[in-house]
Image (cartoon, rainbow, N blue to C red):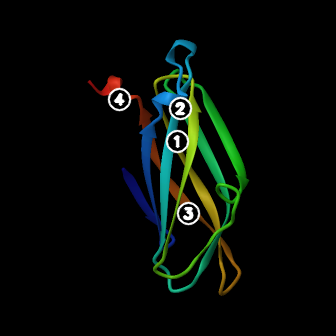
Amino acid sequence: MTSKISEGVTITAETFYQPEYSNPVNSEYMFAYRITIQNSNIFPVQLLSRHWYIFDSDGSKREVQGDGVVGIQPVINPQAKYQYISGCNLRTDMGSMYGDYTFKNLHNKKEFHVSIPSFEMIVPFKLN
């Protein structure tokens, strides 16, 4: 698990290898990740968009951008948390992701960016 605080928002990421959705023979490795977003500000925020950088251990890189997360743009009140689970497929048995979210301060309507900490995705047998 990894965490990072920026702009009064804490992002925590946790990953899980998904062997039932993976096929190592075909270089297909599926991971789930759980993101927890905690708003420590005194104002509500709305998550508008995401921007991910995804790396396989063979050096390949992908970028993913889009509105919201898992199809929604959640509002997170002061001192509240929002959590979601999503997934990422890799072509290698190890990789990593990091990125940022764009939020809106719902009091003054200004947008700001929050860093998503880098986290690793490693199949369990690589850790032995």
Q: Nearer the viewer, residue 31 or 37?
A: 31
Q: Earlier in the sequence, mark 4 or mark 2?
A: 2
Q: Earlier in the sequence, mark 4 or mark 3?
A: 3
Query: As shown in the figure, which amino acid type bears the numbered disc 4?
Result: Pro
Assess disc 3: are there few (<14), some (14-19) or many (≥20) residues with their C-alpha within 10 Å of its C-alpha.
many
Residue 60 drawn at (x, y percent):
59, 26
Image quadrant where residue 123 sits: top left
Disc on res. 97: 1
Determine the residue located farthest toward the top in the rendered image: 25
Q: Nearer the viewer, residue 83 or 110?
A: 83
Q: Earlier in the sequence, mark 3 or mark 1?
A: 1
Q: CA distance from mark 3 to mark 1?
A: 15 Å
Assess disc 1: are there few (<14), some (14-19) or many (≥20) residues with their C-alpha within 10 Å of its C-alpha.
many
Disc on res. 114: 3
Q: Residue at x 49, y 25 (%)?
A: 57
Residue 119 drawn at (x, y percent):
44, 44
Query: As shown in the figure, which amino acid type bears the numbered disc 1?
Result: Met
Q: CA distance from mark 4 to mark 2?
A: 12 Å
Task: State left or right for residue 114 relative to residue 15.
Answer: right
75 in relation to 21, above or below: below
Residue 98 drawn at (x, y percent):
53, 46
Please give the residue where the numbered disc 4 appears in the rendered image: 124
For the residues carrying marks 1 and 4, which lies nearer the camera in this image? 4
Residue 85 drawn at (x, y percent):
53, 52
Q: Residue at x 46, y 46 (%)?
A: 118
Task: State left or right for residue 38 relative to residue 73.
Answer: left
Mark 1, secondary structure of its residue? strand
Please give the residue where the numbered disc 2 appears in the rendered image: 30
Q: CA distance from mark 2 to mark 3?
A: 26 Å
Q: Earlier in the sequence, mark 1 or mark 2?
A: 2
